Amino acid sequence: MSRAVHGAKRKNHRKKILALAKGYWGRRHSNYKTAKDAVVKALSYAYRDRKDRKADFRRLWIVRINAACRAEGISYSRLIDGLNKAGAAIDRKNLAAIALEDPTAFSAVAAKAKEALARA
């Protein structure tokens, strides 16, 4: 009688890897050995990029705020400094949303920052 070596466990593990590789090109979706390498790399990229997403969005918000600031005749760094001196507790995400959706409100925020800079 032949000896079973983790038959069901091994099959299930391979099925799981191949399921994760669904949609990959060429052998990477059907051949366990190549699929395993592709899945490991994909999962490591996914982990890394979940962390990077936060920085990417912050960069985007800063670019949007800077563009709106320039239209108001002030630089991004001066706006942030002015808001800090004015004691305005508004984060970059919301500031970018205001700049994009409500330019008149952003003008008021910029005016507050300019006023605080003039006082200090």
Image (spheres, helix red, strand yellow):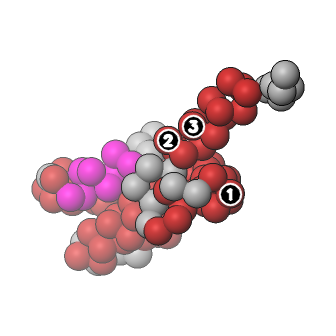
- Residue corresponding to mark 1: 33
- Dominant secondary structure of the magenta stretch? helix
Q: Does the magenta-highlighted stretch encompass residue 6?
A: no
Nearer the N terminus, badge 1 or badge 3?
A: 3
SS assignment at label 2: helix
Q: Residues within 10 Å of mark 1 (few under 14, many from 20)?
A: some
Residue 32 at x, y percent in the picture:
63, 52
Tags 1 and 3 touching, CB below 8 Å: no
Total numbered circles: 3
User: Toward the viewer: 69 or 50?
Assistant: 50
Q: Which residues are magenta?
A: 93-100
Q: Amino acid at mark 3?
A: Lys
Q: Which mark is residue 68?
A: none
Q: Residue at x 15, y 59 (%)?
A: 103
Tags 2 and 1 touching, CB below 8 Å: no
Which quarter of the image is occupied by the N terminus? Answer: top right
Q: CA distance from mark 1 to mark 3?
A: 12 Å
| Residue 70 horizontal side relative to residue 63, left or right | left
Tags 3 and 2 touching, CB below 8 Å: yes
Q: Residue at x 15, y 52 (%)?
A: 102
Q: Which mark is residue 15?
A: 3
Q: Amino acid at mark 1?
A: Lys
Q: Residues within 10 Å of mark 2 (few under 14, many from 20)?
A: some
Q: Which mark is residue 19?
A: 2
Nearer the N terminus, badge 2 or badge 1?
A: 2
